[in-house]
Image: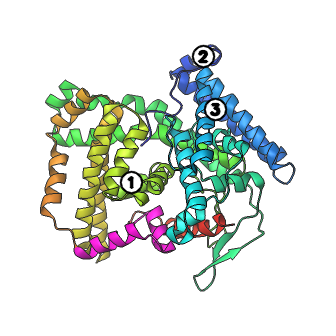
Amino acid sequence: MPRRGPAMATTSTTGSTLLQPLSNAVQLPIDQVNFVVCQLFALLAAIWFRIYLHSSKTSSFIRHIVATLLGLYLAFFCFGWYALHFLVQSGISYCIMVIIGAESMHTPMMIITQKITSLAYEIHDGMFRKDEELTPSQRGLAVRRMPSLLEYVSYNCNFMGILAGPLCSYKDYITFIEGRPSYVTQASENGKEEAQQGRADPSPNAAVSDKLLVCGLSLLFHLTISNALPVEYNIDERFQATASWPTKVTYLYISLLAARPKYYFAWTLADAINNAAGFGFRGYDRNGVARWDLISNLRIQQIEMSTSFKMFLDNWNIQTALWLKRVCYERASFSPTIQTFFLSAIWHGVYPGYYLTFLTGVLMTLAARAMRNNFRHYFSEPPLLKFLYDVITWAVTQVSISYTVVPFVLLSVKPSLMFYSSWYYCLHICGILVLLLLPVKKTQRGKNAHENNELSRPKKFDERESSLGQNSFSTPNNICSQNQDLGSRHSLLTQ
């Protein structure tokens, strides 16, 4: 999960003065108002960028320059002189990449951190490793030449993603800026995927309109309902003393459910901005419908209907999950799950609540995996039994997720431990008992080891990327199209 809100940093004096009346009107902190205003400006700029600076009308040099200057303007508006860190850190990191070949680097800025580390590994894979040493995904994302300084700064600081992302691969971004033709896939009559070239990217207007509608509903929900259901009420002494257990469980779930729309708003708006500029087109599905979800950061339906801990995480903050997988999980020499959660905690910041959440998340993930491996196959037939199993696992997953992320919202140690104490650490204890009592099936262990060590088959990689799972609540077309589209991504990136 991301931090408490996007772009939550010190704002410039000018921005605060101009927008204070608006902040008072909607009762939002001024930094959040600045963020929304800047993102709306970026949306308009993206439409102008696609229409008047399309790759067919101007050079990639001009597109890089304009995207970078607009991005830096938004950064200065939101952060004031603190925005110089974007340039300083990017410049230092670029020098390090040129000197040492992009072996490793770190930066405190979350989105920039993702982009710099991703590009570092992509350059390392493309220039310092042999093809046979790479997985299919690493081979597709590998960068074969050192980016120019302009390309590097444009990738990191472009106006479409400087405030809220989402993360995109360097090759995807450069392909978009240069306007190079891409390969897309459609399913033929025999069910196999066929590559097609030369088909023009469709208009993103419908996709942008749909995402703006989601943004509007999410913002409305946040302003009207979320504030009435604070997560902090879970540790209210009177509530703890008088509420029954069903009431505690219900309020825990509802309060965390109400906390999510602000992330839906921020990430969906960021996705819409990229689409409005013409970036984010993945291809066409088997029905010929355009997909504008190349860099989408969440799937709301799968999040709310998740029947496993992993399914929730794989559909929440998708690009960050892919980043963690590519830079840590696939490259870890031991305990990849623990290392990945620890890296995620460090990346989020220094609040103790982050570490409590991610430590709990490791336990919940391993316990949920053990439960699923040992019991799922008993409930695959008949359909009614499978449906009942999905309903139960949905309820358990939603409560477990809510229980896990409370410290993420509370941030401090004392209130976090107060919450867990009021629940008698019950889910921690259950998770430990599950790991101690349930056996790890040898066949499943062998399968996991094979997938973790090799990841050499595109189909397996696609399943791990989308991880929608077998869920009776999920839309079948979504599952099929995600597997198809992620497969087509590899052929696109190799061009």
Q: Mark 2 packing: few (<14 Cα in 10 Å), some, or many (20+)?
A: many
Along the line of sight, the residue nearer the viewer: 322 or 241? 322
- Picture quarter with the C terminus: bottom right
Highlighted magenta segment, given as a residue range: 442-469
N-term mark: 2 or 1: 2
The reply, left or right, for residue 58 in relation to residue 354 is right
Amino acid under disc 1: Phe
Disc number placed over residue 87 in the picture, else none: 3
Disc 1 or disc 3, which is closer to the eye?
A: 3
Question: Observer-nearest residue: 315 or 453?
Answer: 453
User: Which residue is drawn at the image coordinates 40% and 44% (left, top)?
Assistant: 344
Q: Does the magenta stretch include residue 203?
A: no
Q: Tell me where residue 196 appears, x and y as whole percent.
A: 71, 74
Mark 2 or mark 3: whose residue is earlier in sequence: 2
The reply to whether the C-beta atoms of the residues labelled 1 and 3 are less than 8 Å apart is no
Neighbour class for label 1 at 10 Å: few (<14), some, many (≥20)?
many
- Identify the element where label 2 is drawn: helix
Q: What residue type is labelled 3?
A: Leu
The percent coordinates of residue 338 (x first, y second) are 31, 52
Q: Mark 2 points at which residue?
A: 16
Asked whether the residues under the numbered discs 2 and 3 touch, taking CB atoms below 8 Å apart as contact, a structural biologist would say: no
Please give left or right for residue 107 compared with residue 66 in the image. left
- Height in image: 382 above or below 81? below
Instruction: Return the residue at label 1.
Output: 312
Residue 205 is labelled as none
How many other residues sit within 10 Å of disc 3, few (<14), some (14-19) or many (≥20)?
Answer: some
Secondary-structure class at tag 3: helix
Look at 54% across and 39% down and name the residue there: 266
